[in-house]
């Protein structure tokens, strides 16, 4: 799924399968307070009751049903190129 951009509409159709008799609608949307990433809550009326699913927008532009991973502090090593000029004694 990483190479294929999936639209929110395609995911709603995949997960909720709305039909003219049972429609789906956006009930909440916004940004998460912790990292300002976008989310959308879509609800569909079912015979057993209301089904609600949250969708989250990832950095690569793909909507998913799971939130993006939290970026954690990481250490990295930068190799420094040293100028080893000739030393005249």
Image: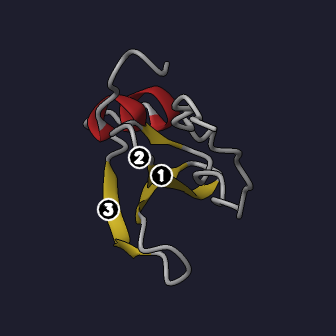
- 42 relative to 46, above or below: below
**Mark 3 and mark 2 residues within 8 Å of each other at the beta carbon:** no
The residue depicted at 36 percent of the width and 70 percent of the height is 27
Task: Give the residue pinned by disc 1.
Answer: 55
Query: Residue 8 sits in which quadrant?
Result: top left
Q: From the viewer's perspective, tell me whether residue 75 is left or right of residue 49.
A: right
Question: Is 19 left, or right, of 66 in this rendering?
Answer: left
- Looking at the image, residue 30 sits to the left or right of residue 69; the answer is left
Relative image position of residue 46 (x, y in whole percent): 53, 48
Pointer 3 or 1: first along the chain: 3
Q: 1 and 49: which one is in front?
A: 1
Q: Position of residue 19 (x, y in %)?
A: 32, 33
Determine the CA span between mark 3 and mark 1: 11 Å
Q: Which residue is mark 2?
A: 59
Which one is in front, 58 or 27? 58
Decide which of tag 3 and tag 2 comes sooner along the chain. Answer: 3
Q: Cβ–Cβ below 8 Å for labels 1 and 2?
A: no
How busy is the neighbourhood of tag 1: few (under 14 within 10 Å), some, or many (20 plus)? many
Q: At which x and y percent is residue 22?
A: 37, 43
Residue 26, located in which quarter of the rendered image?
A: bottom left
The residue drawn where x is 57% and y is 44% is 65
Residue located at (56% from left, 80% from top): 34
In the image, 48 versus 36, the foreground residue is 36
What is the C-alpha distance between the residues marked 1 and 2? 13 Å
SS for tag 2?
loop
**Display colour scheme:** secondary structure
Label 3: which residue?
A: 26
Q: Mark 3, residues whose alpha carbon is within 10 Å: few (<14), some, or many (≥20)?
A: few
Relative to 17, does residue 23 appear above or below in the rendering? Answer: below
Which residue is farthest front? 89
């Amino acid at each position: 799924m990483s190479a294929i951009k999936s639209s929110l509409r395609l995911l709603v159709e995949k997960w909720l399968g709305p039909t003219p008799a049972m429609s789906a609608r956006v009930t909440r949307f916004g940004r998460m307070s912790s990292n300002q990433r976008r989310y959308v809550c879509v609800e569909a009326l079912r015979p057993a009751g209301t089904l609600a699913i949250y969708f989250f927008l990832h950095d690569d532009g793909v909507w998913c049903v799971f939130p993006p991973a939290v970026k954690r502090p990481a250490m990295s090593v930068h190799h420094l190129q040293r100028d080893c000029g000739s030393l005249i004694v």
